Image (cartoon, helix red, strand yellow):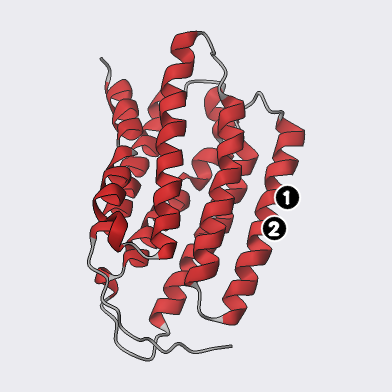
């Protein structure tokens, strides 16, 4: 088995890491983290379908990936909206999610449902890279000291920034890579996905210190 195949399977099965963490800590998770737990279950199901469909004769699973982009916007949009305390950042989140849905629809029109959603994933990468940076901005503007490494959203947000921030150019240039071979380049995606799932798992497992934090408001 080639290195590319090993990393691809590792990437797929790494989706079970946050699922196991969510099951282990589900009773102690906040409402926001329980929402993330549901997302990880759905994500693991999608990964399973992506693995199974080629083996049952369905060679093009692009429609499934298109549908998953919608799920990403819904869940992460709600999570970020509820995690932001600064009113202006909540408004930015709403606007960014609306733009993300518009990007998905536009990508569907220009690329078709049977093609990999390169445009939609590129657009989502821009949106969630921006939101993740704004969340770090919120953390840095806290008036009271907070142990950010013990905050679940710190790890989840780090995973979002790591995954989307690195893969943005991969999604943008997917068509050019596909015209040659995506195997070597897709290693980047598989590796970032594995590390992102590890960060998600840490976020679900770490002990959240319930510190009352006052934030600047704009």
Q: Position of residue 96 (x, y in %)?
A: 64, 61
One can see residue 198 in this view: no
Quarter occupied by residue 138:
bottom left
Q: Is residue 68 above or below residue 27?
A: above
* Residue occupying the point 29% across, 48% down: 23
Q: Position of residue 113 (x, y in %)?
A: 68, 28
Q: Nearer the viewer, residue 122 or 180?
A: 122
Q: Nearer the viewer, residue 192 or 13?
A: 13
* Residue occupying the point 25% across, 70% down: 150
Disc 1 element: helix
Alpha-carbon span between mark 2 and mark 1: 6 Å
Q: Position of residue 43 (x, y in %)?
A: 44, 39
Q: Is residue 65 above or below residue 82?
A: above
Q: Left or right? Give the position of 40 relative to 67.
A: left
Q: Disc 2, disc 1: CB below 8 Å?
A: yes
Which residue position holds label 2? 98
Graded by Cα atoms within 10 Å as few (under 14), some (14 to 19) or many (20 or more), the crowding at tag 1 reads some
**Quarter of the image containing the N terminus?**
top left
Labelled disc at residue 214: none
Which residue position holds label 1? 102
Q: Left or right? Give the position of 126 relative to 28.
A: right
Q: Is residue 102 above or below residue 116?
A: below
Graded by Cα atoms within 10 Å as few (under 14), some (14 to 19) or many (20 or more), the crowding at tag 2 reads some
* Residue occupying the point 31% across, 55% down: 26
């Amino acid at each position: 088995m080639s290195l590319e195949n090993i990393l691809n399977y590792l990437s797929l099965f790494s989706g079970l890491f946050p699922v196991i963490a969510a099951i282990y800590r589900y009773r102690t998770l906040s409402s926001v983290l329980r929402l993330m737990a549901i997302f990880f279950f759905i994500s693991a199901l999608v990964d399973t379908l992506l693995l199974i469909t080629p083996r049952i004769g369905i060679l093009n699973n692009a429609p499934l990936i298109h549908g998953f982009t919608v799920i990403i916007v819904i869940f992460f949009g709600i999570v970020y909206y509820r995690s932001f305390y600064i009113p202006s950042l909540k408004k930015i989140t709403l606007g960014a999610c609306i733009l993300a849905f518009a990007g998905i629809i536009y990508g569907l029109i220009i690329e078709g449902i049977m093609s990999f959603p390169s445009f939609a994933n590129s657009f989502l990468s821009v949106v969630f890279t921006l939101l993740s940076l704004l969340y770090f901005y919120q953390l840095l503007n806290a008036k009271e000291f907070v142990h950010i490494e013990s905050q679940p959203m710190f790890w989840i947000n780090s995973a979002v920034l790591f995954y989307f921030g690195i893969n943005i150019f991969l999604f943008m240039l997917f068509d050019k890579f596909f015209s040659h071979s995506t195997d070597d380049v897709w290693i980047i995606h598989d590796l970032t996905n594995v590390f992102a799932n590890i960060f998600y798992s840490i976020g679900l497992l770490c002990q959240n210190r319930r510190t009352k934090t006052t934030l600047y408001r704009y």
